[in-house]
Amino acid sequence: MDELLPNPESVFPAPARAKAPARRHLPTLPRLRWKGIALPNFMERRTKLDPIVFLTVALSLTSAGVLGHLYGPGYEMTLDGQRVGMVESRQMVASAVNRVEARASRILGYDYSLTHTVDYTYHLTLREDLMPVSQVETYLFDQIGEVMKVPVLTVNGQVIGAAEDEDALNTMLESIKAPYINENTVSAQFLQPINISREYTATASLLELEDIYATLTANSVERVDYTVQSGDTFSAIANSRGMTVRELQALNPDTNIDRLWVGQTLTVSQAVPFLSVQTLDNVTYDGPVDFEVEEVPDDSMYQGNTKILTPGVEGLATYNADVTYVNGIEQTRIINTTNVITQPTTQVVAVGTKPRPKTMATGSFIWPIYGRVNSGYGSRYIFGSYSFHSGIDIAGAYGAAIKAADGGKVTFAGTGTGSYWSYGKYVVIDHENGLQTIYAHCSSLDVRAGDRVYQGQVIARVGSTGRSTGNHCHFQVKVNGTTVNPWNYLP
């Protein structure tokens, strides 16, 4: 049949064609090769199918890149037959198990090992479905019966205990504040930093709220300051605090227990709650207004002497103040407003301007003799038994000068008899205002009863008369007839 058909060109003669221009040859490019195979050079030869081939290859490569980014190899992890999720690798899970075991061992205090059976099934999976390692570790921790993630209470960085109910913990903490809160309280807070955080902890360490409450409210011993008052002794301060002298001395290792002075600060112990509560109260109350003092010179009185001419009278005012308390004890008081109801009355005082005689007391003491203190004031062991020492013994060379600690009148100068026989030769000086000084065990006396002496005047000489173990001056101070600690009056 094909042979019977006429040649198309013979039936429809082709029109005359214009002569095609000469083909422009592109420069020859080097052949690209991959693993020894020559690759086609698309710049050398182009066909109508070249763009389609190129586009197909490009789309294939792009699709492969996208799929490789979205999908990847993974493993379906099961724990004791229970599906956990998709993980990236077995090695990742093994590392997570090691970290979980190490952490559980630290929490429990002994070596802990997971006994669960872990199985894996290989899958090609979406990368976004892979479990992060942190999620795997959390899941494994939740399978440990000996460890729980519960609220843990810490005070000042110290772990107090763990409980199952965080709300109950907070309620318990508020109950500790409650006794210190009243209708005037503006704020209440704990002095120590408080923190409640959910943490993994040993199940056995869970405490009842009552036990945590007992710990927080139990008293502990803290160091506090005490200011020495007139007449204080080291032993008396210790006894008033329920301590032994040795315990008080341990808190004050650099303090000479035989030499205390008024205003000296000692460290003593005092019981305070483990958890302290600080409150701020805004209070309004009526209180006194201090009166002013007006001084009027008076040349009929000696210098240093005063006399009240017009007594002062306190006024009355209504105050508003912010008061800070710690465990119910006031710490600071800041007055915000003052509304005076009754004005105070000024006190008028006459002040002496007449020069004082040299023999009058100055009101302050000097050392009668300078030397080492051999024996202090208070209880001591001497002559084979314990006894109370009423003064201090200051060592000195035989015949050294003993001076009056202050000006005054000599009321006794002689040898002791009766209850004072042990003093040997001694001197008593009255310094006015109820103050007396005694100088005992002297070798000789330089004054007589009735003499007036000035501060620093030689009144006797060092010796060892009476009941004495060596040359020294026994120095004693009395206030209104009662013996007191000389250290409180010496500079």
Image: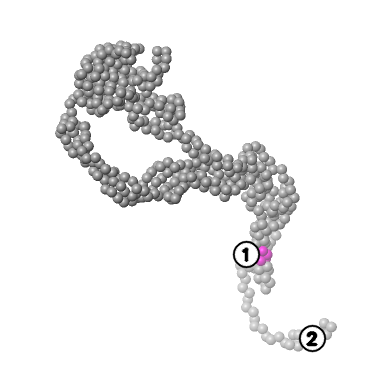
SS category of the residue bearing label 1: loop
Which residue shows up at 31% across the image and 45% down it? 288
Over which residues does the magenta segment extend? 57-63
* Above-or-below relation of 167 to 441: below
- Apparent side of residue 391 relative to residue 91 in the rendered image (left or right): left
**Residue 416 highlighted magenta (yes or no):** no
Q: State how far apart marks 1 and 2 are (Cα).
A: 46 Å
Position of 388 with respect to 31 (left or right) is: left
Label 2 secondary element: loop
The residue indicated by pointer 1 is 29
Side of 455 relative to 189 (left or right): left
Judged by its main secondary structure, the magenta piece is: helix
The image shows residue 263 at horizontal and vertical percentages of: 34, 32
Q: Quadrant of the C terminus?
A: top left
Residue 261 point in image, percent of width and height: 34, 28
The one nearer the camera, 291 or 45, is: 291
Residue 471 seen from this side: no
Rendering coords of residue 139 (x, y %): 66, 49
Label 2 sits on residue: 6
Q: Quadrant of residue 213?
A: top right
Relative to the observer, which residue lies in front, 142 or 49?
A: 142
